[in-house]
Amino acid sequence: MSVRAAVVVGCACVVAFGGPIARAASEPGGSAPPPLVEAPSCAAPTGEVPVIDLREGQTLVSFDVPAITRLQLAAGGSVAAVATNTGCAPRSGDVFVVVPSEGVDGRAASAEERAAALSLAGAGDWREPATWHTVV
């Protein structure tokens, strides 16, 4: 199997704020949320690597690193923090995983947890992969 990682250059995005972010911006004296800032290009799968001629002794090695969104939950079960490995905010096509603490294997996120992460993570600076973003 041969897969390679690449980037998508450019993104036309429309961001709609909902939930606590929208309330904070609309309440009297509430401050607007920080703008959404992402890497100039987000990691994205590129499909199969083209077949190339290898010389004797050469080996083609390639791999796929899936876009992963990690979630930490608050004591009550709501999404408390979100991190991605792409340099961009969570996307619906990401693999969503709930991790109990840093460095511990997690479980697949439920549909409700995925939806909450997508709706609550529409602002902030996402350029640094693996950085936790506290949900407001």
Image: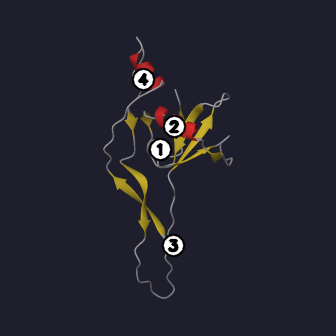
Give the image location of residue 116, x and y in percent. Answer: 53, 34
| Mark nearer the N terminus (1 vs 2) | 2
For marks 1 and 4, give the one nearer the viewer.
4
In the drawing, does residue 100 fall left or right of residue 97? right
Quarter of the image where one finds residue 134:
top right
Rounded to the nearest angstrom, the CA distance separating label 2 from label 4 is 16 Å
Residue drawn at 68 percent across, 29 percent down: 75
Q: Secondary structure at mark 4?
A: helix
Residue drawn at 50 percent across, 62 percent down: 64
In the drawing, does residue 111 fall left or right of residue 119? right
Residue drawn at 33 percent across, 37 percent down: 14
Residue pointed to by mark 1: 128
Residue pointed to by mark 3: 61
Rounded to the nearest angstrom, the CA distance separating label 2 from label 3 is 35 Å
Task: Check disc 4 and give the amino acid type.
Answer: Ala
Rounded to the nearest angstrom, the CA distance separating label 1 from label 4 is 24 Å
Most extreme residue toward the bottom is: 56
The image's mark for residue 22 is 4
Q: Residues within 10 Å of mark 3 (few under 14, many from 20)?
A: few
The image's mark for residue 115 is 2
Rounded to the nearest angstrom, the CA distance separating label 4 from label 3 is 46 Å
